[in-house]
Image (cartoon, grey):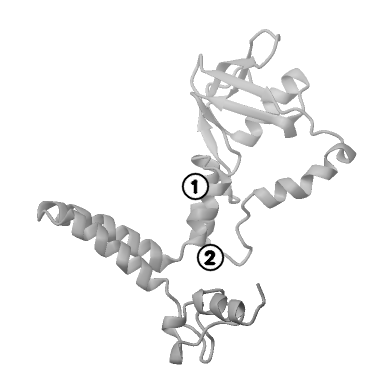
Amino acid sequence: MAGDETDVEITVKTVGPVRPFRIRVPAEVKVGDLKRFVAADRCLPVERLKLVLHGKTLQERKNGGSEDVRVRLQNGDSLMVAVIPRPPAKHLCDDYDDDDDDLKFHIPQTATWWKRKLFYLLHERLRLPDMVLVAIFSISLKAWAGIVLWFLLAPVAHRWDVGPLYILGTGFLVILLNLGKKPHGELSAYSIFNEDFRELPGTLNADRLDRDIRAGQF
């Protein structure tokens, strides 16, 4: 390989007290093969290597799929290499696995392809917290369309000096859309909304107190 004109010499820097070293690799190489070159040169565990080139972490697969990622190297490039520590023994972390899984967002297996792509972008590339991902994926497409439409119309309302009315109207609209439907025959907690102003059993009001006092129950 040393005499191949397509080879380049790069500097490999590892995290820790190990001094940087140089190796020759192909100018265009798959990330997986690059890991194996580095691991073979210094007897490192290839399955636990992380490579950083020009400030970016190199992924072996494109967008989490099956397509290999290739990188183009030049003479003198610096490659950062980190060895991921081994996970703790299974018996030490079993008690915490269930709690951690409950706090992490997992996209359903039945999710569409575009949701999986969006999840990969937000979780792997942008590193958004799981709570933010839960909020994003729990909102329906209609709700997102309404949010986008609201922000598009907000500058128009500001231009026509009806910003306060626009915000008040939005508040009333949100209330009306979330009222829901009451099943037939179900009583409301507010007697004014019930037929003949019927009250729920056990409702405490002035009439109830008056009846109890007259009946000598106080």
Mark 1 Cα shell of 10 Å, populated few (<14), some (14-19), many (≥20):
some
Nearest the viewer among 26 and 159 is 159
Q: Is residue 218 left or right of residue 192?
A: right
Give above or below for 65 relative to 186. Answer: above
The numbered disc on residue 112 is: 2
Which residue is pictured at 44% across the width and 92% down the height?
A: 196
Which residue is pictured at 42% across the width and 82% down the height?
A: 192
Mark 2 Cα shell of 10 Å, populated few (<14), some (14-19), many (≥20):
few
Nearest the viewer among 2 and 87 is 87
* Residues at marks 2 and 1 touching, judged by CB atoms closer than 8 Å: no
The residue pinned by badge 1 equals 121
Q: Is residue 25 left or right of residue 142?
A: right
- Amino acid at the residue labelled 2: Thr
CA gap between label 2 and label 1 equals: 15 Å
Tell me where residue 167 sits by quadrant.
bottom left
Residue 46 on image: x %, y %: 73, 31
- Amino acid at the residue labelled 1: Leu
**First reached walking from the N terminus: tag 2 or tag 1:** 2
Residue 49 on image: x %, y %: 69, 29
Q: Secondary structure at mark 1?
A: helix
Q: Secondary structure at mark 2?
A: loop
Which residue is pictured at 62% across the width and 62% down the height?
A: 108
The numbered disc on residue 214 is: none
Q: Is residue 145 left or right of residue 129?
A: left
Whether residue 67 can be seen here = no
Instruction: Spot the residue most to the left.
Output: 160
Whether residue 38 can be seen here = yes
Quarter of the image where the C terminus is located: bottom right
Give above or below for 210 relative to 25. Answer: below
Residue 172 on image: x %, y %: 31, 67
